[in-house]
């Protein structure tokens, strides 16, 4: 599983969902959680942290957001060579399930259907971590 020191960026335009994700992640033992309010904010945060030498190691992003969607963020992230394999989980709603394939093609590590449940989040994190540790 991802270590407790994994630097995590959570991206959602709804403060309540960011709070929920943060609470789940903290309960799972994670200590370094940063928030962004949309894709654009997230990308700027990613660039700034990379410049500072402490890049994020996991992104959990909503799909539907103003300014830049989660899919646009994902494509932008994957266009940066050193972020090709950066774990990226995308959140969708039940009626967007058909879009999941599009996100997988764009390089999403996994997806979570809202409403997010703590056990599902934990399971998707574990699957993502296993996938990465098998490929490296
Ligand atoms: Mg949203």
Image (cartoon, grey):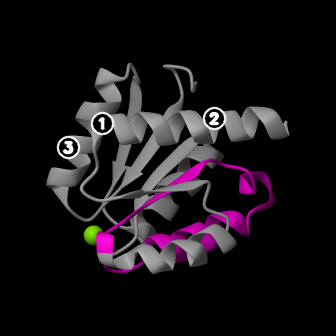
- Closer to the camera, 106 or 39? 106
Nearer-N-terminus badge (1/3): 3
Q: Label 1 vs label 3: CA separation? A: 13 Å
Q: Residue at x 25, y 49 (%)?
A: 18
* Mark closer to the observer (2, 3): 2
Q: Which residue is drawn at 56% across and 21% down?
A: 3
Instruction: Identify the residue position indicated by label 1 in the image.
Output: 118
- Closer to the camera, 135 or 81? 135
Query: Does the beta carbon of the residue at mark 1 sit less than 8 Å from ligand 1?
Result: no
Instruction: Identify the residue position indicated by label 3 in the image.
Output: 19
- Closer to the camera, 93 or 16? 93
Residue 61 coordinates in the image, percent (x, y): 42, 58
Disc marking residue 129: 2
Split into quadrants, the picture shows ligand 1 in the one at bottom left
Q: Residue at x 39, y 41 (%)?
A: 121
Q: What stretch is highlighted in magenta?
A: 66-94
- Relative to 29, 54 lies left or right: right
Residue 105 visible here? yes
Q: Are marks 2 and 1 in contact (CB under 8 Å)?
A: no
- Relative to 83, 4 lies left or right: left
Residue 28 coordinates in the image, percent (x, y): 36, 23
Q: If the image is split into quadrants, where does the C terminus sit?
A: top right
């Amino acid at each position: 599983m991802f270590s407790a020191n994994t630097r995590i960026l959570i991206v959602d335009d709804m403060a309540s969902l960011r709070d929920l994700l943060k609470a789940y992640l903290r309960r799972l033992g994670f200590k370094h959680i940063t928030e962004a309010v949309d894709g654009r904010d997230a990308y700027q945060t990613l660039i700034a942290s990379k410049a500072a030498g402490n890049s994020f190691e996991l992104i959990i992003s909503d799909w539907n957001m103003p300014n830049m969607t989660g899919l646009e963020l994902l494509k932008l992230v994957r266009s940066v060579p050193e972020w090709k394999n950066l774990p990226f989980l995308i959140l969708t709603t039940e009626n967007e399930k058909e879009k999941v394939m599009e996100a997988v093609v764009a390089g999403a590590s996994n997806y979570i259907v809202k409403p997010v449940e703590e056990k599902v989040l934990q399971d998707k994190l574990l699957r993502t971590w296993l996938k990465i540790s098998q490929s490296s």
